[in-house]
Image (spheres, coloured by chain):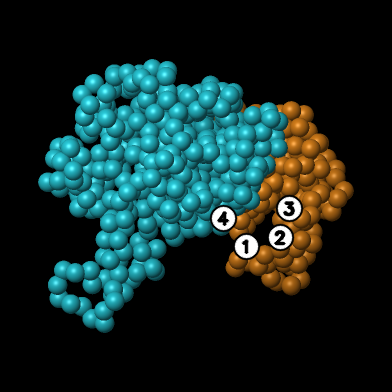
Amino acid sequence: MNMKPEFKIISNLINENSQVLDVGCGDGILMELLIKEKKVNIRGIEISKAKVQNCIAKGLTIIEGNAENDLKQFPEKSFDYVILSQTLQAFLDPENVINELLRIGKQAIVTIPNFGYWKIGLHLLLKGTMPVTKTLPDEWYNTANIHLCTIKDFVNFSKTKNFKLSKSIALKSDQQSFITNSNLNIKNLSSNLGIFLIES
Amino acid sequence: MNDKENIRTITINNPLKLDCGKTINNFPLAYETYGSLNKDKDNAILVFHALTGDQFVTGVNPVTNKDGWWSYAVGPGKSIDTEKYFVICANVIGGCMGSFGPSHQNPETRKIYGTDFPVITINDMVNAQVNLLDHFGIKKLFSVVGGSMGGMQVLQFVSNYPDKTKTAVPIACTSSHSAQNIAFNELGRQAIAADHKWQDGKYSSKNTIPDKGLAVARMAAHITYLSKKGLQEKFGRKLQERDDLKFGFDADFQIESYLRYQGSVFVDRFDANSYLYITRAMDYFDLVKQNNGNLSNAFKNTKAKFFIISFTSDWLYPTQENKDIVIALNAIGANVGFVEIKSDKGHDSFLLDVPDFLKALKNFLDKSFLEK
């Protein structure tokens, strides 16, 4: 399995020996990285039975479940960090998921595939079909991504919903940079991924 | 019928105060072991058996000459690898494979206990079995594992002895017997009591057994261990050694014949009064009530790592009841993993060749064993 470039950045955001929950942890690649690099105490939640099996085979603590319903079992601030890597757009109710992340985590790390990326806009403009890219590889009819947004959308969302963006990082391939108020429009066009450290 | 020479027992000298208020002394506990205890004595797994199980987990059961009840999961190279782990399993008290139970003689009256045997609970069962740790000089088990009633014992064990195991694997179980569970158990008990040969539990003094009643109890219970889909696929409406319906009440259908067979072989190996006592123990099991309505309190003193497993087609101990245990553990930040295994084999899935289950169990144990 390939290590997503964002995983290194997520790892840099996390303090050693912290309590972490990885929501939608997939095959547990990020979990393994964080255990190795940051000695975290980490749990994962994953909906796919096959991926749950892969995590068990790696000795990871994994709970089969649906983050849409199964986050409510965790008490308030029971984790230092709750990670949601490229899955926010797949939830029926992303707003509720963000609220839950901020309830159970002291901080949350949310990464989103940026629908504002210029290649995506150009694809739609020139080809007239729903964009298919490396970070958004599915066709419109079989994609799990029902709530796609842009980096700018997420920044605006944070203002509307009154949560704090402690760190905002834009990623283009493997080049990272900070997102600020003054470069927001540029980053929204030039990045394929946004990584946000948020807190309430 | 029973070759009881092959049963290993220890006598428990510590008085055991039962939940019913009575105290039992110097009673036998029958057990079996597989594999060998390592030098550090940190590779022991205590397996708890289900309602009709016994201590003969794997290999050939020397009493019935059939395969041990968990042969798919336990053995050399298997999920519970006896080349790696020292597996201990005891017959529960109240049982009929050598441990203190209703078919034993009351030393005071010199009569078989029958229904004079004290009512026992899941709590009593684990409090009896914990003595095995001292017997083997084990300070801390590597794991406690069990399905169904065995899973209830896992939960009770960790609650009672939070420091005595490194990991805990409750499978296809519940923290509190539901009304439906109690109802099915009551059906079985009433079937036994309705057999005139039961004689209020004193059948052994009359040299008889309530075989019809016990067989019906087993038949009814057996249905609850399977799924509708599993039954339909295996039997459907297939006829038993006949080309057409016979317009009578013989076993026309294969499913009828199958259930009758299951009932008939069961009475050869199981005691009717034990069936009453053990089902009662299951019905009384309510770890939520034991903890004043908060299941999390049962586990608040343990650092054990939990792995909870349920099965999609298990309607006797459905996924949600297993998940309730996960939720209670997460509420206190306990280390808990959970997986629901896809299987059409119903509650019995944990006893059968269900590769995803066997793989998950093996991986959890083997990886956890390497952790410090």
**Residue B132 image point, x, y percent:** 50, 28
**Residue B280 image point, x, y percent:** 28, 35
Please state, as top left, top right, bottom left or bottom right, where the C terminus of chain B lies in the image: top right
User: Quick one: label 3 or label 2, which is nearer the N terminus?
Assistant: 3
* The hue in which chain B appears in the rendered picture of the protein: cyan
Secondary structure of residue under mark 2 = loop
Query: Label 4 is placed on what type of residue?
Result: Asp
Cα distance in 3D space between marks 3 and 4 = 37 Å
Nearer to the camera, A24 or B116: B116
Secondary structure of residue under mark 4 = helix
Of the two numbered discs 1 and 3 in the rendering, the one whose residue sits closer to the viewer: 1
Cα distance in 3D space between marks 4 and 2 = 31 Å
Query: Are the two marked residues, 1 and 2, in contact with CB atoms closer than 8 angstroms?
Result: yes
Residue B356 - label: 4
Question: Does residue A120 appear anywhere in the picture?
Answer: yes
* The hue in which chain A appears in the rendered picture of the protein: orange
Residue B232 - label: none
**Residue A145 image point, x, y percent:** 62, 57
